[in-house]
Structures are given as structure tokens and as C-alpha cells.
Image (cartoon, rainbow, N blue to C red):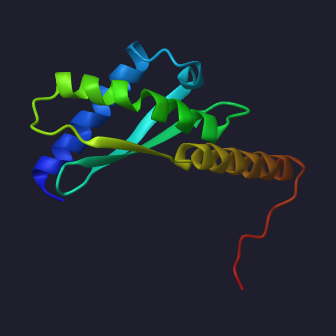
Amino acid sequence: MTRRTERLNHLIQIELSDLLRKHVNDPRLNRLISITEVAVSRDLKSAKVSISALGDNLDHKEIIKGFVSASGFLRRELAHRLNIRVTPELTFEFDDSIERGVKLVSLIENVAAAEKVETANGRKRNTKRK
């Protein structure tokens, strides 16, 4: 990836986050949504946008539908904000890395709490490997 595409990826990510936070009124997108990554193609005509959301009872398909519905508006606003010859066509995919991270932290906390209970009860856990 060239330095130019890296800068463009980062700039698009920042601008999309700002647009999402301030200007998109779609109720499907009124959650804690994060733009985790943007990958612009070599010819700069398309961009794959990875999104992540936190919350209970998330419907990933509905969130993606909300982004597809808002893609024309987002692309038009990017064209106004960015000084580039061609504004890339946006495609959206759901990224569950934040959800997996939250689950992993929860599991680690559960194991740490269980070990604390075991040591409080006077039992030592055998940590030697055979």
C-alpha cells in the first residue's frame, strides 16, 4: 500500500466518522458505531469500509442496510470535504473485532476472579506444566 492510499484511507475514516456522528439521521445508525478500517482500491474508485457496533440485540444486517441507504449521502459529502479527483464508491462490511475483544476481556476477568476465590479459600492452583 502506498503512502498516498494510507493517508486517503485514514482521511476517509475520519470524515465518515464525523459525518456519522453529526449528520446521519437514520435510526438504524443511532447506536455506538465505529468505523474501524477503510481500504481504498489501487485505482481509488472503490473503498471497503469496515464498521463495528456495540450494544445488546444488534442486528448486523439492519446496520449494513442503514449504511447502504446512506451511502449516496456519505459519498456526496466526502466529495465536498475531500480534494480528490474521484470519490470512491463505498461498500460496507461488518467487523466484529470489538465484540470479540469485549468477550475476551470478560473471559479473562472471569478466570482472574475464579483464581482469586481459589487462593482466598486456601487452595493453590498447580501452575507447573508437565
Q: State which quarter of the image contains the C terminus.
A: bottom right
Residue 27 lies, in percent from the top left, at 58, 18
Looking at the image, residue 124 sits to the left or right of residue 64; the answer is right
Q: Position of residue 24 (x, y in %)?
A: 44, 18
Which of the pair 72/130 is nearer the observer?
72
Residue 63 lies, in percent from the top left, at 57, 34
Which is more toward the observer, 10 or 25? 25
Q: Is 54 displayed left or right of 83 in the figure?
A: right
Camera-nearest residue between 52 and 105: 52
Q: Nearer the viewer, residue 34 or 106?
A: 34
Q: Residue furthest right?
A: 121
Residue at the image position 19 percent from the left and 57 percent from the top? 42
Q: Quadrant of the N terminus?
A: bottom left
In percent of the image, x 82 and y 61: which residue is there? 124
Looking at the image, how many numbered discs can be counted on the residues? 0
Q: Residue furthest bottom?
A: 130
Q: In this rendering, is residue 55 above or below 98?
A: above
89 lies left or right of 122: left
Q: Please, is residue 17 above or below residue 113 in the view? A: above
Counting from the top left corner in percent of width and height, residue 58 is at 68, 34
